């Protein structure tokens, strides 16, 4: 139990057992499912935790409340990592009411068979819940990250309970850089919904926020401008880091050699940051995060069964489904008899907004030859322009 303010307490849990968060993201440092108790004349609990941790969470709550009973359970988001212990809460405290959006109650019935019709309070944008000195105001945040999501502002302590927003992978007792794991989390999970996040940021700009309490990752208490700025960049598909990200696949190492030569030339030309990823041997979510981090990307792959190599195909699919846009893109293709990887990649990216392809596309027929170096130099000049 951690004290966030004099009357707001963190009561969530750490999960070190999860192998893949949401069934697809590696979380080498575990995951935190946060929950908070706002203790006043009345007590509100903000969200529950994953069903594997129900008892630990109920124990945290009981210890924090020291014999008092919660009056309200506020459900900001219905994804099971947060809603998995609703039924246990409602059973443990039969006089408590459950507070959420209309859409969340519909989901609750679908997930858990009941929306607690005798005990529920439906709230919407601008609704308030008075606890005493604390007054909670609910703000609709559709698609951050599901349609039913609300976030909550406490005007007494100037705290924003931000649901999945401003979350990161990793348990709370892990010391690691916030930005990399928050980017991997944001781009992977919410990246498709940039306009909706922008809408929420505009609403948040009208509030005096001193602390952000997300449902994953640490409570943010200082330098909030840094986090808000990163969210503004990510959700507007802006450039976070000046430089080039080179993503490649290679069957026998020939494409890799050319990508490494290109990276070397970019560094020699003064490119501020060059990041290289072998898509077959790197975490996909990190690579996807880097594609949205940098303003320029090089995609290098082989022609394969009149298509492209599967790791690159999957990677590009992950980009397009997250509305990849506003980037300079260079293509490197390899093909031993009929190279067409560049054409396939270009077609896959055809519906992305505001992509600028370099004039130079590097084509290899199995391996680098006498012309390759000159092609790479041309490409470097375009990427550095
Ligand atoms: Fe952490 Fe969208 O659930």
Image (cartoon, rainbow, N blue to C red):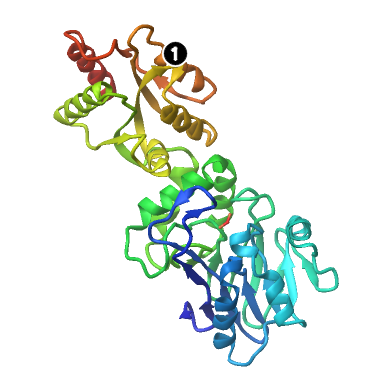
| Residue 99 in the figure: left or right of residue 151 | right
Which quarter of the figure is the C terminus placed in? top left
Q: Is residue 298 above or below residue 282?
A: above
What x and y, as percent, mark residue 90?
73, 76
Ligand 1 is found in which quarter of the picture?
A: bottom right
Q: Which residue is mark 1?
A: 343
* Image location (x, y in percent) of residue 122: 78, 64
Residue lying farthest right? 118
Q: How many marks?
A: 1
Front position in the image: 225 or 248: 248
- Residue reaching furthest bottom? 67
Q: Is the residue 247 above or below the residue 286 in the image? A: above
Q: Position of residue 310 (x, y in %)?
A: 44, 27
Against 87, residue 293 (above or below) is above
Which residue is rendered at x = 17% and y = 25% of the image?
A: 265
Q: Residues within 10 Å of mark 1 (few under 14, many from 20)?
A: some
Nearer-the-camera pick, 260 or 222: 260
Q: Quadrant of residue 270?
A: top left
Residue 56, picture quadrant: bottom right
Tag 1 secondary structure: helix
């Amino acid at each position: 139990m951690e004290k966030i303010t004099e009357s707001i307490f963190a009561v969530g849990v750490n999960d070190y057992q999860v192998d893949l968060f949401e069934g697809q993201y590696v979380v080498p440092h575990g995951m935190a499912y946060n929950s908070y108790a706002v203790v006043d004349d009345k007590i509100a609990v903000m969200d529950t935790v994953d069903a594997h941790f129900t008892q630990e969470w109920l124990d945290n709550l009981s210890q924090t409340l020291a014999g008092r009973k919660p009056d309200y359970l506020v459900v900001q988001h219905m994804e099971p990592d947060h809603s998995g212990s609703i039924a246990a809460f409602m059973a443990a405290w039969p006089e408590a009411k459950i507070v959420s959006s209309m859409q969340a109650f519909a989901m609750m019935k679908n997930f858990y068979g009941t929306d607690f019709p005798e005990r529920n309070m439906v709230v919407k944008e601008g609704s308030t819940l008075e606890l005493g000195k604390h007054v909670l105001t609910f703000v609709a945040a559709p698609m951050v990250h599901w349609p039913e999501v609300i976030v909550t502002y406490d005007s007494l302590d100037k705290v924003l309970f931000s649901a999945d927003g401003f979350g990161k992978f990793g348990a709370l007792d892990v010391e690691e850089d916030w930005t990399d794991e928050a980017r991997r989390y944001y781009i992977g999970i919410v990246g498709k919904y940039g306009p909706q996040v922008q809408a929420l940021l505009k609403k948040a700009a009208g509030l005096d926020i001193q602390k952000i309490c997300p449902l994953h990752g640490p409570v943010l208490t200082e330098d909030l401008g840094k986090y808000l700025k990163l969210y503004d960049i990510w959700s507007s598909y802006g450039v976070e880091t000046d430089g080039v990200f080179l993503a490649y696949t290679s069957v026998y190492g020939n494409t890799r050699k050319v990508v490494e030569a290109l990276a070397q030339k970019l560094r020699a030309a003064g490119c501020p940051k060059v990041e290289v990823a072998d898509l077959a041997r790197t975490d996909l979510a990190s690579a996807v995060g880097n594609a949205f981090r940098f303003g320029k990307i090089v995609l290098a792959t082989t022609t394969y069964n009149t298509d492209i190599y599967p790791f690159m195909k999957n990677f590009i699919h992950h980009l397009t489904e997250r509305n990849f846009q506003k980037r300079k893109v260079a293509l490197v293709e390899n093909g031993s008899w009929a190279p067409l990887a560049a054409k396939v990649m270009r077609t896959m990216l055809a519906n992305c907004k505001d992509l600028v392809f370099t004039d130079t596309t590097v084509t290899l027929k199995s391996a680098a030859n006498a012309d390759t170096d000159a092609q790479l130099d041309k490409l470097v000049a375009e990427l550095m322009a």
